Every structure is written in structure tokens, then in C-alpha cells.
Image (cartoon, grey):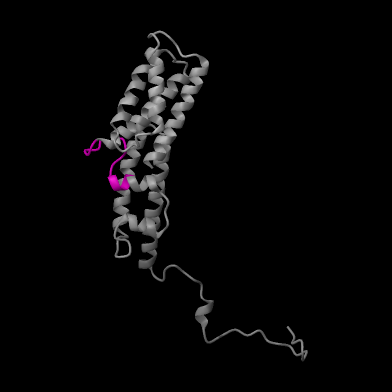
Amino acid sequence: MYSAGTGRRLEKRYDTNRPELYEEVKLFRNAREREKYDNMADVFALIQTLQCLEKAYIKDAVTAKEYNDSCAKLLAQITAAFNLVKSSTYPDIKSFMNGFYMDCPAAAQRIEEGKPITVQDNQGNVSKSIANVISLYITLCDKLQMDMKAKDELYADLKCLVDILDRMSNLPPNFEGKEKAYKWVSELDKMSAADCLDEEQVRQMVFDLESSREAFVRTLG
């Protein structure tokens, strides 16, 4: 490289007095620090996995037994893994999640409750009610899609759904899922046991049930 004014060659110089500027940057400098970061990565990955499991259960992508077994195992693993990283910086899992900007609300709720959603909650059976509502939404949609559209094939599950929604005090009084469920109970009340919904009614009922389930999950999320 040459100087524009003198035409003399310029030497490219490095600051040899600060060799640390040319060192490779590492997260850790010894085995102990490396283990610390490995342990934090384990906790992060387990929480993300739990979030994915919660979403999979809501979408009926796993069975209740698969969910229950996997969730209980993950909760135990998260507790054990977090004990290795617990410190004044991260005194609890919530502070760890906030520190790493983790957007995992379903996992956070499950960790706070300390049990799968399918396990009965001793304080008002809230978790059991949530699981039952989701299960009933799925069951009713499955029945309709399997051409089970007679009143006596649908009424008991639909009435059970309405009863549970009525008992859930944590739902807003104007929750749209309640209104739609009431509407279909009223519709079935007009029919005899062997009467069937027509194709238009089946299509509308499936739509109402699926949209209500999504609203239910959003409301409680």
C-alpha cells in the first residue's frame, strides 16, 4: 500500500503491545466455566422441549398417556438440571427464563404448577377441568368427522362440555365458547334421539367447536 502524497510504501502495522486483541473469544476459560454453560444450555433446551410438548397436547398431536409420562419426566429433569445452575443471578426458573428472553408461557405455567395438566389439581381441580374441556372439544369434532351426527351420539358430551365451562370461574362470563356450546345444546334439545344434524349443521358445528377450542386455549394462556 502506498501513500497518496509521497508515493512511499506504507507498512501495515499491528498493535503488538495488546496481544489480547487478537485472541479467540471464548465463553469459558476453564473446565468449570465450560460445565456451567453446558448446564445452562441443558435447562434452556428442556424448557423449550416442555413448551413444544404443551402445544402438541393442545393440538391433540400426542395421546394423554404420552403427554402425561413425557411431561412428568421433563418436569423432573428441569428441576434437577436447574439445581446445577441456581445462583444469585438465577435464584429461580422464572428469573432464568427472563434472563434469556424465553417466550415459553405454557412451559412456565406447567413448571409453576409442578404437574402435568392431566393430573388433578387439589385446588379446585382447575387443571383437570382444562384437560377435560380440551378432550371434549376433540372428541366431539372426531365424532362429527366420523359421520356420528345423531342427537344421542353427541348430546351427552356436549352437555358435559357446557357443565364444565359453567363451573370454570377463571373464564370470562362472555367467553364465546360458552355461547356456542349453549346454542348447540339448545339445537339438540329440539330433536328426538334418532334425529341427525344435516351436512350444513355438521360443518358449522365442527367450525364452532374448533374455533371455541382455540379461543379457550388463548383465554387461559
Residue 59 appears in the figure: no
Judge whether 210 appears above or below 36 on screen.
Answer: above
Which quadrant: the C terminus? top left
Which residue sits at x=37%, y=54%? 43
Q: Residue 16's x, y, as percent?
A: 55, 86
Image position, residue 204 (x, y; %): 49, 22
**Residue 27 in magenta?**
no
Q: Residue at x 31, y 39 (%)?
A: 116
Of the pair 29 and 72, the residue shown nearer to us: 72
Which residue is more in the foreground, 73 or 59?
Answer: 59
Above or below residue 57? Residue 33 is: below
Residue 80 position within the rendered picture, expressed as x and y whole percent measured from the top left = 29, 52
* The quarter of the displayed image where residue 22 is located: bottom right
Foreground of the two, 182 or 1: 182
Which residue is farthest left? 122
Residue at 33% over, 64% down = 89
| 205 is higher (above) or lower (below) than 128 | above
Of the 4 image quadrants, the one containing the N terminus is bottom right
The count of marks equals: 0
Q: Residue furthest front?
A: 174
The answer to whether residue 77 is seen in the rendering is yes
Q: Residue 27 at x, y = what percent? A: 44, 67
Q: Main secondary structure of the magenta part?
A: loop
- Confirm whether the magenta stretch covers residue 115: yes
Is 156 displayed left or right of 141 in the figure? left
Q: Which residues are magenta?
A: 110-124
When asked about the image quadrant of residue 41, the answer is bottom left
Residue 196, by quadrant, is: top left
